[in-house]
Image: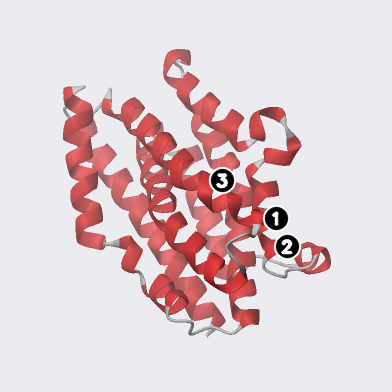
Amino acid sequence: MEKFVELKKVTDRMFQEKKIEQHPLFVALNNGEFSEEQRKEMALQIYHVVLYFPRFLSAILTNMSDYRMRMPLVENLFEEHGKMNEKYVHSETYKEFLKGIGVSEKEIMESEPSIPVIAYNRGLTDLCLHYHYLEGLAALGVIEEIVARVSPLVGQIAKSNYGSENKSLIHFTDHEVLDVQHANEIYEVVALNYEGDQKQMIERGLQFGMYYHSRMYTDILENVH
């Protein structure tokens, strides 16, 4: 518990310094600076990230020998897959969100990830698969917390533009809660090893998570302008 508290002080400080909720992408969205087509394209690019996230978790799991440490992550992966109910698979709930903002099934099928999103997906896959699991896991913890922090913003913006009764927005209302829980579960696993030489590795992983995800938001913003 003591190591978890120590680790959380580090992540809290990171989020105080970075203020991800004030990223220019969300400021511009909140100010209504995008056309409907631009909003749809940004949402589609995030879709290609949502599709990939379970693979990051799976890559981490291949590098963990202790089943007791794997168990919280397996549960996380289970939830990513809707607890085996296809209706609640996260990529499917996100697809419902896309349809709720006017993206057609054809547009979803024909959408391709942009170079920045491909770079993000490949970079995180490499980190999770080819380096020490603590580094990749720390990065995923920060990413989960970022999503938890921005989901209320995106959900509120979507309600303003597409109606508060739009049931497709459940993807973001769910993630306001789920991703806080997932981030803390990941931090708890990482904190078990937050000592000695591994501290530096873990803190580098935290920084990777903040860099990769905030950079991805920046690149998506630039890509639609």
Query: How many other residues sit within 10 Å of disc 2, few (<14), some (14-19) or many (≥20)?
Result: some
Query: How many other residues sit within 10 Å of disc 1, few (<14), some (14-19) or many (≥20)?
Result: many
Q: In the image, what residue occupies the spot 55% across and 54% down?
A: 121
Q: Which mark is residue 99?
A: 2
Q: CA distance from mark 3 to mark 1?
A: 15 Å
Q: Amino acid at mark 3?
A: Phe
Q: CA distance from mark 2 to mark 3?
A: 21 Å
Q: Earlier in the sequence, mark 3 or mark 1?
A: 3
Q: Earlier in the sequence, mark 2 or mark 3?
A: 3
Answer whether residue 64 is visible to the viewer in this image: no
Q: Nearer the viewer, residue 187 or 93?
A: 93
Instruction: Classify mark 3: helix, strand or loop.
Output: helix
Above or below 95: residue 161: below
Residue receiving disc 1: 95
**Mark 1 vs 2: CB contact within 8 A:** yes
Residue receiving disc 3: 53
Above or below 8: residue 69: above
Q: In the image, what residue occupies the spot 53% across and 36% down?
A: 57
User: How far across and how far down the image is residue 131, in percent?
Assistant: 42, 38
Q: Nearer the viewer, residue 170 or 217?
A: 170
Q: How is the image coloured?
A: secondary structure
